[in-house]
Amino acid sequence: MIESRLHDEVLQIRMSRYEDFPAGTWVNAFLVDGLLVDTGAAHTAEELKSFLGDKYLNQAVNTHSHEDHVAANRFLQDTYRIEIYAHPLAVDKIAGPVTLYPYQEDVWGYPVPSKVKPLGNYIATEHYSFDVIPTPGHERDHVCLFEKKNGWLFTGDLYVTTAPVVCRPNDDMPQTIKDLKKIRGLNPHTIFPAPTHVVTSPCEKLDKLISYLEALEERIDRLYRRGMGEAEIKQEIFPEDSIITEATQQQFSSLNMIKSFLKKYERQDKEKR
Ligand SMILES: [Zn+2]
């Protein structure tokens, strides 16, 4: 299923395998001045290819290597002969096979591997230039794209909600706080996230999210210094498991959030030894 909506000159292309777009099962791609930002999941790849048939499409960027951002690459390359770019660390991952959780296979599907080119510091279209902003907290190969003149910021999976309670084992939450501060410093006029709705005047929401995560980190640090372990801290701060945890076969969990904030102590302990 595809729904589209224009925001300024940016076309939001919302895609889901399911007709009623249930929460957590849809993802956005964006088309602006011939540049496609992300190519969505495998289950919607053919549909995206057809949808773009009467649009001006010249090139694409993958914000990162995850399966719900790259899966139409090959279809678009074969049909429209476009170049696709991603962070240098993403190139090999996108070209190789991946292993998915069963829920990911259901919701997104397995992407066909594709060959993409490494991104430089910016990407130019006919009328605009987009700065590439490395934001490695969500994934080491994650980038945002920023168009200064209009204040358009494409945030991939960096922004989802103002108060997240779960994350994946690979998320680096302290780095995510740094990434959020970096994009907040750009004073974006509009953010275009992949996993949720477009946000105009997003600075208040970004401030709220940064404060929330900093307060969470402080609380976790305090409990850790009192001698509590990760499981106890999780029980204290997030006594109830989010429904997302069961739905994602434990890939997204509050325990992962705690562990990510506690990683710095592992590193410090190693350095002391
Ligand atoms: Zn992702």
Image: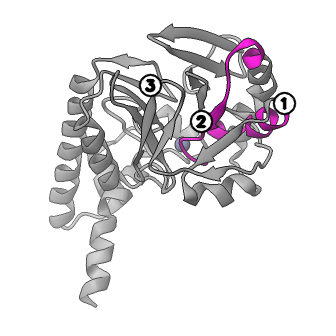
Which circle's residue, 3 or 2, is located before the other in the chain?
A: 3
Separation of marks 3 and 2 at Cα, in angstroms: 25 Å
Q: Which residue is mark 2?
A: 247
Q: Nearer the viewer, mark 1 or mark 3?
A: 1
Which residue sits at x=55%, y=48%? Answer: 251
**Over which residues does the magenta segment extend?**
51-79
**Residue lying furthest right:** 78
Q: Is residue 176 above or below residue 12?
A: below
Decide which of 214, 223 is in the foreground and name it. Answer: 214
Task: Please tell me the numbered disc located at residue 79.
Answer: 1
Q: Quadrant of the N terminus?
A: top right
Q: Which residue is mark 3?
A: 192
Q: Nearer the viewer, mark 3 or mark 2?
A: 3
Q: Is residue 51 left or right of 176 when viewed as pictured? A: right
Q: Is residue 52 above or below residue 72?
A: above
Separation of marks 1 and 2 at Cα, in angstroms: 35 Å
Q: Is mark 1 within 8 Å of ligand 1?
A: no
- Is there CB contact under 8 Å for labels 1 and 3? no
Which residue sits at x=49%, y=52%? Answer: 139
- Which quadrant of the figure has residue 270? bottom left
Q: In the structure shown, which secondary structural element does the residue marked by tag 1 occupy?
A: helix
Q: The disc labelled 3 sits on which kind of residue?
A: Phe
How many numbered marks, from 0 up? Answer: 3
Decide which of 111, 38 is in the foreground and name it. Answer: 38
Q: Is residue 114 left or right of 78 when viewed as pictured? A: left
Task: Please tell me the numbered disc located at residue 160.
Answer: none
Q: The disc labelled 2 sits on which kind of residue?
A: Ala
